[in-house]
Image: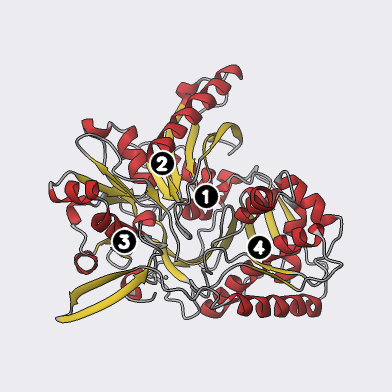
Amino acid sequence: MLGPLVAAIDQGTSSTRFLVFNAKTAELLSHHQVEIKQSFPKEGWVEEDPKEILQSVFECMERTCEKLTQLNIDISNIKAIGVTNQRETTLVWDKETGEPLYNAIDFWLNKNHLKHKTGLPISTYFSAVKLRWLMDNVDEVHEAVVSHRAMFGTVDSWLIWCLTGGKSGGVHCTDVTNASRTMLFNIHTLEWDPELCKYFGIPMEILPRVRSSSEIYGLMCLGDQSAALVGQMCFQDGQAKNTYGTGCFLLRNTGAKPVMSDHGLLTTVAYKLGRDKPACYALEGSVAIAGAVVRWLQDNLGIIGSSEELEKLAASVGTSYGCYFVPAFSGLYAPYWEPSARGIICGLTQFTNKSHVAFAALEAVCFQTREILDAMNQDSGIPLTQLQVDGGMTSNRLLMQLQADILCIPVVKPSMPETTALGAAMAAGAAEGVSVWSLSPEDLSEVTSEKFEPQINPEESEFRYARWKKAVQKSMNWETTEPTALFFFRTLNKKLECFTVNVGPKY
């Protein structure tokens, strides 16, 4: 007898998964994955179809349950389902028809204001500017807002609303971790901020109700990176994890008080594991391109046929031979927040071949992690002594060894790398009324880990890192054409203020 099971919907940028865990051992029993199509209507713009996202969830749930039945596992033992999701992607839908009014928007490009309330710089990476653009440029959205039919949410809100009844009474809610990525949420009061909403001209009636990350409200939910923090059991101040997915996200638990960064990091809500439990905060470093560079090498350049082939290609030479790759395809995120940067490959010679470029691509992921780890150590004043890692790219053993070498500290990978989905499942299983998990180390006592120790001397690591920093500087100020800008005029503290956010060419 397996006993109670807990499941998770893991809706990410490039795919959707449904995973079912044994609540006693945290063993992954079955899962199914469906890729999500992305469209790129303009440079720097990324969109996805909300209906395709929802359908992918249905398909993953159905296929996983079929697999469980084939294994003679009773699906009625699933006691709770958590949701973890891409956090900043923005949706607006009609609450009467249930129809999305535009594609889900996930576009990139940046500025710095109001950070004391939100922990975030003003950037199109976060939801508020995207929502403002939709209200100003999409007639269906504008009309729905005026007629009080519009609902706004990140992907978690859309999925929970649809899965709990939709237009027939679906629950319109989000959790504190997703709300904290909108630029409309006060991370100190843990509420939507009327002043911020007025600043961006967003009516508060379209916003979802904010809940904790672990309570029954139809479904439990956590933003993807917060879920990974929970899945890695990083519950103590100073513990950190790095997730290697489409992008790369390093979060460090800072305890019950938000810490504002002086070195280009974000301050975010890590989790709130219960209606009456305190919120926990984190410093976060976000890297736009990690696993996405693998897809770029595969789809755009055609030098590899799969991610596994990338590791073999890079391992065949064991060095970049002085080649450095800065994958700033749509600018740089933390710690620079520099939208003018563009991707470059430099240090090329006649000897350079595709194997060296493959190695440089893996190093790029590691160097970007080093940059945000350095910033995090400066902000906290206490250097990390090891880094816990998870995500799809951690199956690349060469990447993990390179990461340890470049950081000069051990890298620890759990034997079960699906910690994002596990974290969402744990939050669901720990909710009052479910309580099949206690969120203590004993929950994961059967999950082992592998440690990668640095194998090069610190001098060599520092030399390579210095060359990387030089390459980053050469990628800056590359994009000089002036894109279309959103102009905001808002009265704040009795002063008329104006700011602009560059969002690229208008449709």
Tag nearer the camera, 3 or 2? 2
Q: Give amino acid for label 4.
A: Val
Give the image location of residue 299, x and y in percent: 64, 48
Pick whichever, 457 or 299, lies toward us: 299
Q: Which disc number belongs to residue 49? A: 2
To which quarter of the image does residue 431 belong? top left
Graded by Cα atoms within 10 Å as few (under 14), some (14 to 19) or many (20 or more), the crowding at tag 4 reads many
- Upstream in the sequence, badge 3 or badge 4? 3
Q: Which residue is mark 4?
A: 365
Q: Which residue is mark 3?
A: 128
- Disc 2 element: loop
Q: CA distance from mark 1 to mark 2?
A: 38 Å
- Disc 3 element: helix
Pick whichever, 244 or 315, lies toward us: 315
Does residue 132 sit above or below 483 in this rendering?
above
- Upstream in the sequence, badge 4 or badge 1? 4
Task: Left or right? Give the position of 280 relative to 332.
Answer: left
Give the image location of residue 288, x and y in percent: 54, 61
Q: CA distance from mark 3 to mark 4?
A: 28 Å
Give the image location of residue 438, x and y in percent: 47, 45
